[in-house]
Amino acid sequence: MVSIPETFPGLQKRWFLRKPPVPARCLLLASVLLPMALFGSPSSGAAQASVGGQLAWNPDLLNDPTWGVGARGILPLPLGDLALLGTVDSFMPDCKNLECDLLDAGLSLLWLPSVGMESQVYLGGGVAVQRSEGTWRLGNHRELGISLRAGLILGGRAFLRFRPFSEARYQLMGGDFPNQLVISGGILMVLRRSG
C-alpha cells in the first residue's frame, strides 16, 4: 500500500479523525447484529422494491476519513424475508497532488426480520469489488472482497414513499486495500409496495 506523507501532523491528534482499533469495530458491529439476530422472527413480504441515493463515510481508506456518494437498489425475493441489495459508491480520497478515485460496488443478500415495529432492520452479506483509478496506485487496480452489513430503514406514515436509511458495513478485502468500515445513509424511493 502506498503511504501518503502527512502534511498536517496536528490533525492526527484529534479524536474524531483517529481510526478505531479493529476490536472496537468488531464490538460495534456485533452490538448491532446480535440484538437483531436474537429478537428477529421471520414474516413474509417485509421487503419493498426501492432505489435511492446515499452518502458514505469510509474512515479506513488510505488511513484518512473519506466521503463518497453512491446509489443503491433493493429487490425483494419470493423467499420469505430475503432481498437482493446492489450498491455503488464513488470515493474521492485526499491524495494531495495525486489524481485518485475509488469505485466501490457490492451485491448482498439481505435478511429483513420482523421486529415488531414499522421501521425495518436488516442483516446481510455478499461480495464487494473495489477499483482504484489514477496515479496513486500507478494505474487501475481491482480487488474482490466480502462485505457484512447491518442497517435500519425508517418506516411509518411519514415515510410511505421516501424512506431514510442508515447502514454500517464491514468489508474484508483481500490484497492491497485494507479492511474497511463504511457508514452510509440516504433516502430510498419505494417503487412498489408489497402486501
Image (cartoon, rainbow, N blue to C red):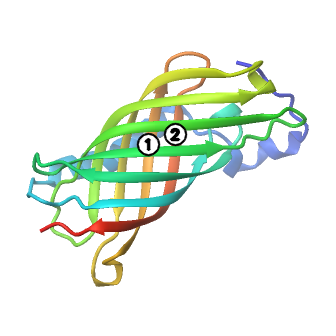
Q: Quadrant of residue 6?
A: top right
At which x and y percent is residue 91?
65, 43
Element type at marker 2? Answer: strand
Question: Vertically, is 42 above or below 4?
Answer: below
Relative to the observer, which residue lies in front, 55 or 115?
55
* Residue 169, numbered label: 1
Q: Residue furthest bottom?
A: 157
Identify the residue at horizontal 81%, vertical 35% (top origin): 95
Question: Vertically, is 192 above or below 136?
Answer: below
Q: Residue furthest front?
A: 191
The C terminus sits in image quarter: bottom left
Identify the residue at horizontal 74%, vertical 21% (top origin): 137
Gap in angstroms between the C-alphas marked 2 and 1: 6 Å
At which x and y percent is residue 157?
28, 84
Identify the residue at horizontal 82%, vertical 46% (top origin): 11
Pointer 2: what residue?
Answer: 181
Question: Vertically, is 52 above or below 177?
Answer: below
Identify the residue at horizontal 56%, vertical 15% (top origin): 175
Element type at marker 1? Answer: strand
Q: Quadrant of residue 63?
A: top right
In this rendering, position of residue 75 left or right of residue 164: left
Q: Does the CB distance between marks 2 and 1 fall below 8 Å?
A: yes
Relative to the observer, which residue lies in front, 121 or 31?
121
Amino acid tagged 1: Arg
Neighbours of disc 2 within 10 Å: few (<14), some (14-19), many (20+): many
Neighbours of disc 1 within 10 Å: few (<14), some (14-19), many (20+): many
